[in-house]
Amino acid sequence: MGVETSCFGAVFSAKGPGRLIRVKERMNGAMYREILSENLLPSARALKMKRGWVFQHDNDPKHTTRATKEWLRKKHFKVLEWPSQSPDLNPIENLWRELKVCCPATAPKLLTALEEICMDEWAKIPATVCENH
């Protein structure tokens, strides 16, 4: 079975992996903003990101809602423009692959055990891997 990355959300930069969280229900725009609020800035601080960094996400509808765009603007996040109808070239896809390779091919019976394995493996991804993606 392996790891289904659609049930995780994550932050990373060239300085290394940030927070990885398990998304326990179907995500909507409000939940996405809450996840950003609780994880994006803490990850940026932990990674010692300096001013001027640019946030990237794709054109998923929950990322592009008017409320999400307004929230990002109010928080003064610089957001990378992403062309509509573009292929998913988001660099985090490469890190999802790294995570899948590191996790067991057969998922543990308990979801909490899988979550723990994924969290541990995510934290071990070296900055050099993040830097190259």
Image (cartoon, rainbow, N blue to C red):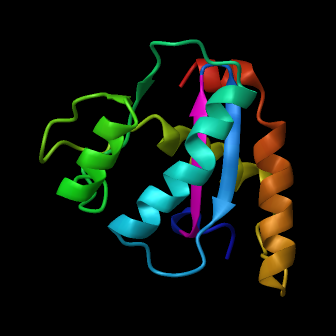
Quadrant location of residue 129?
top right
Q: Nearer the viewer, residue 106 or 113?
A: 113
Identify whether 122 is placed above or below 8: above
Q: Nearer the viewer, residue 73 or 52?
A: 73
Residue with the most extreme bottom position: 109
Residue with the most extreme left position: 84
Residue 46 in magenta stretch: no
The secondary structure making up most of the magenta span is: strand
Magenta stretch, residue numbers: 7-13
Q: x, y (%) of residue 95?
A: 60, 41
Identify whether 46 is placed above or below 37: above
In the image: residue 73, left or right of residue 55: left
Quadrant into which the N terminus falls: bottom right
Image point 78% across, 68% down: which residue?
115
Q: x, y (%) of residue 51?
A: 51, 13
Q: Nearer the viewer, residue 15 or 54?
A: 54
In the image: residue 61, left or right of residue 76: left
Residue 10 in magenta stretch: yes
Quadrant location of residue 72?
top left
In the image: residue 60, left or right of residue 7: left
Quadrant location of residue 98?
top right
Q: x, y (%) of residue 99?
A: 69, 50
Question: Do we see residue 32 in this rendering?
Answer: yes
Image point 84% across, 85% down: which residue?
110
Question: Do we see residue 103 in this rendering?
Answer: no
Identify whether 19 is placed above or below 100: above
In the image: residue 112, left or right of residue 100: right
Image point 62% across, 48% down: which residue?
39
Identify whether 120 is placed above or below 115: above
Q: x, y (%) of residue 65?
A: 21, 58
Q: Nearer the viewer, residue 50 or 89?
A: 50
Count the marks. 0
